[in-house]
Image (tube, rainbow, N blue to C red):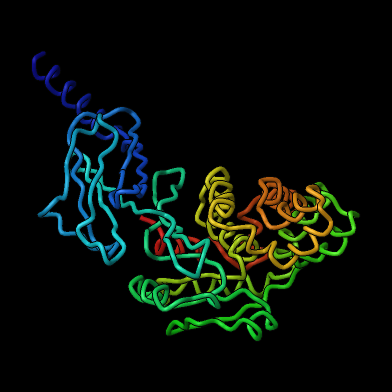
């Protein structure tokens, strides 16, 4: 009887151990005005114990012998000072010596470039995370300053994918070149074609929003060949780190970025959040300067509001486009395989490269 009881207890304990799920942990990093960082986390279910924080200027290599800070997991955050002030800092959090996650500040401050940010840190449904320091997006490299170039070199950029037209590259040539540079002049309806109609009062905010939906989906539907080639570049491990750029980093780069996130099985809420970040990273007045004199002459707030809408991103733009894809292809799996020749095998390879 005792022998049977002991065996039963062993089976129950073994079963409990085997079915114990990995905790769901979300980590974010924010820069503070003081030059320090606030690192925050949430765990599901709530955890007790200690979290240790390590710093590195290389996202794939941390010295785990020397944490820069530690605190109780239940505190939910810790402010830290970076030890390397002249380079970008990445932080690894190790929870109870078992579960580790890397984080960094998503947006990177530049002098001439804007809308510059890292793809890292987004989560898949099973808790995998996009690697930090592998894939970036930005505005045109025509505005690169000497200081910006130093930052790009410190990031180790190996490959640049420029999505601008030949005309844009001719009149505003890039001032930064990586070891590998690819040009894909994405075809589509330009967002500024309504300028005269807006100045004439014939197009309003609603018209612009509908037009931007057409712009986004056209950048997908007219460029299956280019998009396939871009994914082929992403499938080569030695090409990383990669920087994708267009003029403002909020239309063509946004399309490619959204498709990459979808191919990695990042959920729609996170894809939309990444897309909407462009509004925080873009100074619309930069675009309005070309029309500012006419706007002032018109002295019409509605015209200015309409121009502002034209150079901002809108949630409905991306949701409309993705809904149209799903309506035509029934699933993103079918879309990637049929339209872009991104087979399940290729997507698995992409995940091996970009997820941990």
As drawn, is 317 to the left or to the right of 15?
Answer: right
Rendered view: 157 above or below 206: below
Report the front residue among 338 and 13: 338
Residue 296: give x, y in percent of width and height. Answer: 78, 58
68 lies left or right of 42: left
Q: Is residue 70 visible?
A: yes
Which residue is pictured at 16% across the width and 26% down the height?
Answer: 10
- Quadrant where the N terminus lies? top left
Location of residue 123 in the rendering, given as x and y in whole percent from the top left corner: 43, 47
Front residue of this view, candidates 211 and 238: 211
Residue, x 66% and y 58% (percent of image)?
335
Q: Nearer the viewer, residue 261 or 105?
A: 105
Task: Work out which quarter of the rendered image holds the C terminus and state it.
Answer: bottom left
Residue 243, position as x, y percentages in the image: 48, 71
Q: Position of residue 87 (x, y in %)?
A: 29, 66
Of 176 and 300, the residue lying toward us = 300
In the rendered view, tell whether residue 249 sits above or below residue 329.
below
């Amino acid at each position: 009887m005792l022998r049977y009881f002991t065996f039963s207890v062993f089976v129950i304990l073994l079963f409990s151990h085997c079915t114990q799920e990995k905790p769901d942990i979300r980590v974010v990093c924010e820069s503070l005005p003081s030059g320090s960082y606030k690192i925050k986390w949430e765990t599901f279910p709530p955890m007790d114990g200690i979290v240790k924080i390590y710093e590195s200027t290389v996202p794939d290599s941390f010295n785990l012998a020397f944490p820069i800070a530690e605190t109780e997991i239940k505190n939910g955050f810790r402010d830290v000072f970076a030890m390397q002030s002249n380079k970008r800092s990445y932080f690894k959090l190790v929870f109870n010596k078992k579960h580790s996650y890397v984080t960094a500040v998503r947006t990177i401050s530049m002098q001439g470039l804007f809308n510059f940010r890292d793809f890292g840190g987004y989560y898949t449904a099973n808790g995998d995370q996009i690697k930090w320091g592998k894939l970036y997006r930005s505005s045109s490299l025509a505005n690169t300053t000497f200081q910006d170039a130093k930052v790009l070199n410190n990031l180790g950029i190996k490959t640049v994918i420029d999505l601008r037209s030949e005309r844009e590259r001719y009149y505003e040539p890039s001032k930064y070149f990586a070891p590998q540079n690819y040009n894909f002049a994405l075809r589509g309806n330009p967002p500024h074609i309504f300028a005269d109609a807006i100045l004439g009062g014939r197009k309003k905010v609603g018209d612009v929003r509908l037009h931007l939906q057409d712009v986004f989906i056209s950048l997908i539907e007219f460029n299956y060949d280019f998009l396939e080639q871009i994914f082929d570049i992403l499938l080569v491990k030695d090409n990383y780190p990669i920087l994708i750029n267009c003029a403002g980093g909020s239309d063509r780069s946004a399309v490619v970025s959204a498709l990459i996130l979808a191919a990695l099985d990042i959920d729609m809420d996170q894809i939309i959040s990444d897309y909407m970040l462009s509004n925080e990273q873009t100074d619309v007045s930069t675009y309005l300067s070309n029309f500012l004199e006419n706007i002032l002459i018109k002295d019409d707030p509605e015209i200015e509001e309409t121009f502002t809408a034209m150079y901002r991103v809108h949630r409905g733009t991306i949701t409309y486009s993705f809904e149209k894809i799903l309506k035509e292809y029934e699933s993103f799996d079918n879309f990637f395989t049929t339209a872009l020749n991104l087979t399940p095998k290729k997507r698995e390879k992409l995940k091996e490269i970009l997820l941990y």
